Image: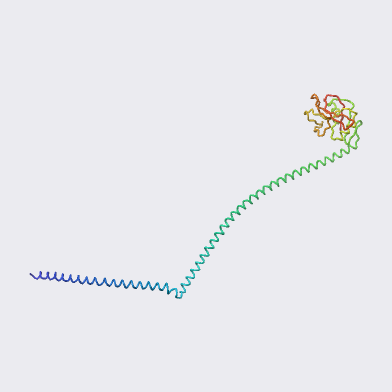
């Protein structure tokens, strides 16, 4: 065996021997650090546990008994005040919300009242305007009536003057005065139309009886139981008796049962003289010849 082989065997033997040694050494070294770690972890856990216990004892037992830190007390006090302010603000907000709700409801009621009052005001304005217009219209009518009244007063005064003149003036010969009128009693006989023409020619017209007093006066100046034409006819409208001046008859003195329109031809009126009473009226045929009475 040469030296190379010996050297190689020696290397291998040494190497194997060293590897076994290293293996043993590494194994022993690896066992030693594992125990240290375990011990260290145990110590660390003990320290942490002690720290937690100490911290718990401090905060739960010692800290409440120790005097408070001024800064912390100030912060605590400020926090309490802020909490109180917040609670007060919350309560005030709720009160304000309640007031707002009440005010909103009250506003709605006031709005309704305002609307109702506005409607009533408009109705009052309309009524006022209508009353104002009616008042103006009545005022205008009053002024017109006043003007008419003044005109009638003037006419009345003029008529009174004329009446006084007539009263002071005697009737013509053959005429009879009664109040302000003059009457002519004919001695001749004519039909109704011709009798009226005769009166008109004398400046008069057939008699128009305006009152019971006048009817009595005429009855007193006529011959006993005679008939005389008067200015009464229904020749325009059958059954509607009118005076010759176009005025309707309002007061009548018909004999009972008259006007009878016997034969459908009696359309002119006459007065009958009666010794008792004030005389009566009768309808007769207009073509018959009768005495007549004129008035002016």
User: Relative to 199, is 132 on the left or the right?
Assistant: left
Residue 233: image location, x then y, percent: 81, 29
Residue furthest bottom as drawn:
67
Quadrant housing residue 287: top right
Residue 270: quadrant of the picture: top right
Residue 196 position in % (x across, y down):
84, 28
Picture quadrant of residue 232 = top right
Residue 108 in the image: above or below residue 201? below
- The residue lying furthest to the right in this view is 173
Q: Is residue 249 above or below residue 125?
A: above
Residue 238 or 172: which is nearer the viewer? 238
Along the line of sight, which residue is nearer the eye, 275 or 116?
275
User: In the image, residue 137 lies at what x, y percent?
Assistant: 72, 44
- Measured from the top left, where is residue 295 in percent x and y? 86, 32
Tally the marks.
Answer: 0
What colour scheme has been applied to the protein in the rendered image? rainbow
Q: Quadrant of the N terminus?
A: bottom left
Q: Horizontal placement of 225 versus 8: left or right?
A: right
Residue 260 falls left or right of residue 109: right
Q: Quadrant of the C terminus?
A: top right
- 256 or 183, nearer to the observer: 256
41 above or below 290?
Answer: below
């Amino acid at each position: 065996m040469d030296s190379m082989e010996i050297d190689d065997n020696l290397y291998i033997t040494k190497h194997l021997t060293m590897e076994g040694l290293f293996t043993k050494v590494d194994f022993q070294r690896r066992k030693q650090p594992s125990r240290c770690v375990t011990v260290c972890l145990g110590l660390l856990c003990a320290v942490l546990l002690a720290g937690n216990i100490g911290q718990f004892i401090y905060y739960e037992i010692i800290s409440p008994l120790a005097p408070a830190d001024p800064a912390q007390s100030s912060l605590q006090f400020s926090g309490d005040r802020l909490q109180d302010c917040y609670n007060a603000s919350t309560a005030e907000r709720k009160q304000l919300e309640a007031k707002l709700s009440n005010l909103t409801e009250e506003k709605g009621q006031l709005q309704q009242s305002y609307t109702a009052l506005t409607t009533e005001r408009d109705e009052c304005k309309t009524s006022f305007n209508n009353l104002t217009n009616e008042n103006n219209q009545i005022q205008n009518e009053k002024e017109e009536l006043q003007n008419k009244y003044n005109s009638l007063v003037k006419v009345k005064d003029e008529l009174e003057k004329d009446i006084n003149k007539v009263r002071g003036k005697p009737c013509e010969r053959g005429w009879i005065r009664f109040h302000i009128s003059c009457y002519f009693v004919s001695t001749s006989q004519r039909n109704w139309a011709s009798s009226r023409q005769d009166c008109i020619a004398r400046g008069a017209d057939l008699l128009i009886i305006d009152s019971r007093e006048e009817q009595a006066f005429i009855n007193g100046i006529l011959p006993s139981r005679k008939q005389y034409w008067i200015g009464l006819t229904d020749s325009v409208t059958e059954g509607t008796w009118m005076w010759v001046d176009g005025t309707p008859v309002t007061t009548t003195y018909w004999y009972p049962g008259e006007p009878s329109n016997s034969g459908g031809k009696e359309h002119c009126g006459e007065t009958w003289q009666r010794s008792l009473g004030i005389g009566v009226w009768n309808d007769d045929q207009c073509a018959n010849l009768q005495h007549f009475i004129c008035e002016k």
